[in-house]
Image (tube, grey):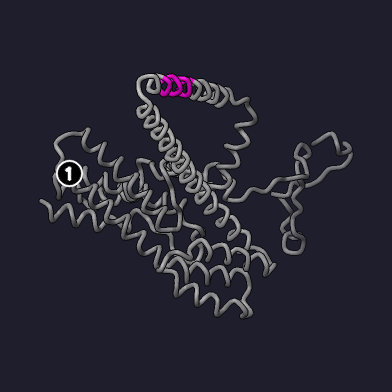
């Protein structure tokens, strides 16, 4: 009995209602007095023990970071500034010394400096363009996600226009762009229009991406199975992963440079960590062991298959990042899709 109820009021427990009243009156369940009325309902996406979505994870990480003074960036900027001053003073001293020796040596040094400056400017422009293209992919993805849930037809038109402009240089999307232009004036809601855009524009690109991942995973499986050193295995896996990420980015319309590739690799590793794709208990590994395939092939070939599966995981994560639309209408590839190819290659290589 709580302190909210008078002592002279007695109520029968709900669990022991009279049999005569049970058929006519439904039991009334009283809310405990120490519970608040504002109950927060959680969805499966917010369940910490369930399958948390990538957006929820990123939001939690972003809130936990807070604002911190960028000491490292300030120190790196100051170091770069001092290094640039040192290079400038050294170059000026070098040119003066060459002019003191001979005029043609001085002019040759000036020409070399001009070529160096043009090369640095071109490299910086290319890197900035590559980073801008990666940012554009994420903007298109967010616009497509918003348009799929919006009721405003202008949102879908804007998202499709950005998507077609981004993929205009890909010859594989020519037929899809023509089909979309034919249906733009039809009466189609936004989810249907975005599903049509995904099917028409990304079907062939997705098929090519799956083929790229399969080929890369097969090469890693074969090379790591026959290589004599573990250091060679690690080096080749890293090389093939970087090559695969770059090819997938170019396939989906990106133009990553050196720093853009480093950014993509970092985001791919973060995506693998957030989605749990690097867990040891992956269903593909369980299937590999459950079917007894590890006992049918040698230990070295089994290690090659495991490395190929890891490469396939990296490729799928890079596909998620580089694809300008999320997987809605089309099925997202899984690691198990490449398991048969790798095991067959391992068995045939015995």
- Judging by the rendered image, the residue that carries numbered circle 1 is 225
User: Residue 219, can we see it?
Assistant: yes
**Stretch in magenta:** 86-96
Between residues 137 and 22, which one lies in front from this camera angle? Answer: 137
Is residue 267 visible in the rendered structure shown here? no
The one of 273 and 324 positioned closer to us in this rendering: 324
Residue 128 location in percent, x, y? 50, 44
Magenta span includes 88: yes
- Residue 339 coordinates in the image, percent (x, y): 28, 55
For the point 57% across and 62% down, the residue is 162
Q: Which residue: 24% across, 52% down?
A: 218
Few, some or many residues within 10 Å of mark 1 (<14, 14–19, 20+): many
**Which residue of the protein is positioned furthest toward the front in this rendering?**
103
Q: In this view, does 269 lie above or below 339?
A: above
Q: Tell me, yes or no, whether the highlighted magenta stretch contains residue 91.
A: yes
Secondary structure at numbered mark 1: helix
* Residue placed furthest toward the left: 350
How far from the left and from the top, in percent, is residue 236?
25, 41
Give the main secondary structure, helix, strand or loop, of the magenta stretch.
Answer: helix
């Amino acid at each position: 009995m709580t302190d909210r109820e008078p002592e002279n009021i007695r109520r029968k427990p709900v669990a022991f209602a009279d049999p005569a009243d049970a058929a006519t009156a439904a039991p009334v369940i009283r809310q405990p007095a120490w519970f608040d009325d504002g109950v927060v309902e959680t969805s499966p996406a917010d369940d910490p023990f369930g399958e948390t979505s990538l957006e929820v994870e990123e939001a939690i990480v972003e809130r936990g970071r807070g604002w911190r003074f960028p000491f490292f960036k300030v120190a790196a900027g100051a170091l770069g500034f001092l290094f640039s001053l040192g290079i400038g003073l050294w170059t000026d001293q070098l040119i003066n010394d060459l002019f003191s020796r001979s005029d043609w040596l001085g002019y040759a040094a000036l020409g070399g400096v001009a070529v160096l400056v043009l090369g640095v400017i071109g490299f910086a422009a290319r890197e900035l363009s590559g980073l801008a293209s990666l940012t554009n992919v994420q903007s298109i993805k967010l616009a497509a996600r918003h348009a799929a849930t919006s009721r405003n037809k202008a949102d879908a038109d804007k998202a499709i226009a950005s998507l077609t402009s981004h993929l205009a240089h890909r010859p594989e999307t020519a037929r899809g762009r023509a089909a979309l232009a034919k249906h733009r004036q039809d009466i189609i809601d936004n989810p249907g229009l975005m599903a049509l855009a995904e099917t028409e524009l990304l079907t062939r690109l997705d098929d090519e991406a799956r083929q790229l991942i399969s080929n890369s995973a097969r090469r890693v499986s074969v090379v790591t199975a026959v290589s004599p050193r573990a250091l060679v295995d690690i080096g080749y896996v890293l090389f093939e992963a970087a090559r695969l990420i770059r090819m997938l980015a170019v396939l989906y319309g990106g133009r990553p440079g050196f720093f853009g590739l480093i950014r993509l690799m970092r985001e791919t590793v973060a995506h693998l960590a957030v989605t749990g794709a690097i867990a040891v208990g992956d269903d593909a590994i369980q299937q590999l062991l459950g079917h007894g395939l590890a006992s049918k092939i040698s230990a070295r070939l089994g290690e090659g298959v495991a490395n190929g599966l890891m490469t396939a995981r990296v490729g799928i994560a890079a596909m998620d990042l580089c694809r300008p639309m999320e997987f809605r209408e089309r099925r997202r590839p899984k690691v198990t899709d490449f398991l048969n190819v790798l095991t067959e290659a391992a068995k045939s290589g015995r």
